[in-house]
Image (spheres, rainbow, N blue to C red):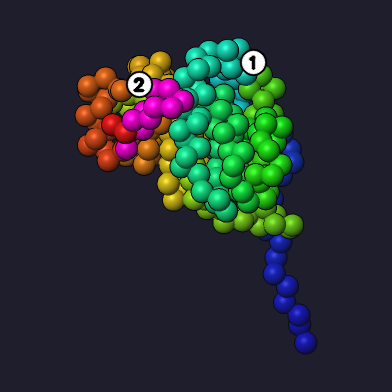
Amino acid sequence: MVTRTTPAPTRLPAGRKAELVSYLSEAEQVTVNQLAERFDVSRDTVRRDLHQLHKEGLVVRTHGGAVSVNAVAAAEKKLDVRMRQHPTEKDQIGALAATLVSDNSVLMLNAGTTTLSVVRHLSERRDLTIATNNLRIAAEISPNTVRDIYVFGGSVRLGGQATIGPVSLQFPGGRDLQLRCDLALISVGAVSARDGYSTSNLAEAIMMGEMMERAAKVAILADSSKFTQPLFAQIAELDHADYLVTDAKPPADLAHALKQAHVDVLIARAATHIETA
């Protein structure tokens, strides 16, 4: 009697893995076709390689190729610098955004100073589950508030005190968990009528987009200084969010675009005065 066993999944050869990561680190961004020609393999093989490397946090998968996780890291301001910018507005936004959070809910929060402001206003909530790439949240949130905190893996960016990698968690043995959340709270770098939500870092934009896709509801956090021209990397179109939480009314063209996209604009003018636009 012959016993059949399930073959082990094909793994990316260590040599090609190291060469691919090294090549991408130098080139900063590449296409699938470029990699297929460079390593003399099929495009399907390259796609599988990039998928595996993305899961390991070694590259950032993009449509049609990949970028190095360090490609645009120099554009990021250190967290302590950003925390001193518009502190009053961020605190007001954080207080208002916290009212969207219910007890026993599951949240995803990205890295950023405005999301930290939200966390500081959650002391009255209970039994929250939080998944994030923000390394500061565990130190900022009240232990009475959370049931569990999960941090997404990947490369650590010390300046931003965040991880950059896939939005995934795994069972022992490597099988991905199917992640969903009740609310994603996403702090962005810019909001524009034409290009939606954007940020300066491509790898970070991809993570934010993944968090938004896994959420039943999405709240974008942006003070009025972010109502500007789009930044380097688009996160999502306007209609991918349910709420925009900010400190002032958007300019007319943006307000119209948000209304057309069915985004509720929530405006916190002061700690005791909250408007809905």
Q: Where is residue 41 in the image (x, y as percent from the top left)?
A: 58, 42
Q: Residues within 10 Å of mark 1 (few under 14, many from 20)?
A: few
In the image, taking residue 9 as reference, residue 31 lies left or right, namely: left
In the image, taking residue 86 as reference, residue 160 lies left or right, namely: right
| Residue type highlighted by circle 2 | Ala
Please indicate, yes or no, whether residue 65 appears anywhere in the rendered image.
no
Identity of the residue drawn at 22% across and 21% down: 252
- Quick one: quadrant of the N terminus? bottom right
In the image, taking residue 16 as reference, residue 48 lies left or right, namely: left
Identity of the residue drawn at 25% across and 27% down: 255
> Which label belongs to residue 80?
1
Secondary structure predominantly adopted by residues drawn in magenta = strand
Q: What stretch is highlighted in magenta?
A: 264-275
> Which label belongs to residue 248?
2
Please tell me in which quadrant of the rendered image residue 39 appears.
top right
- Quick one: quadrant of the C terminus? top left
Q: Distance between the residues labelled 1 and 2?
A: 24 Å
Please indicate, yes or no, whether residue 184 appears anywhere in the rendered image.
yes
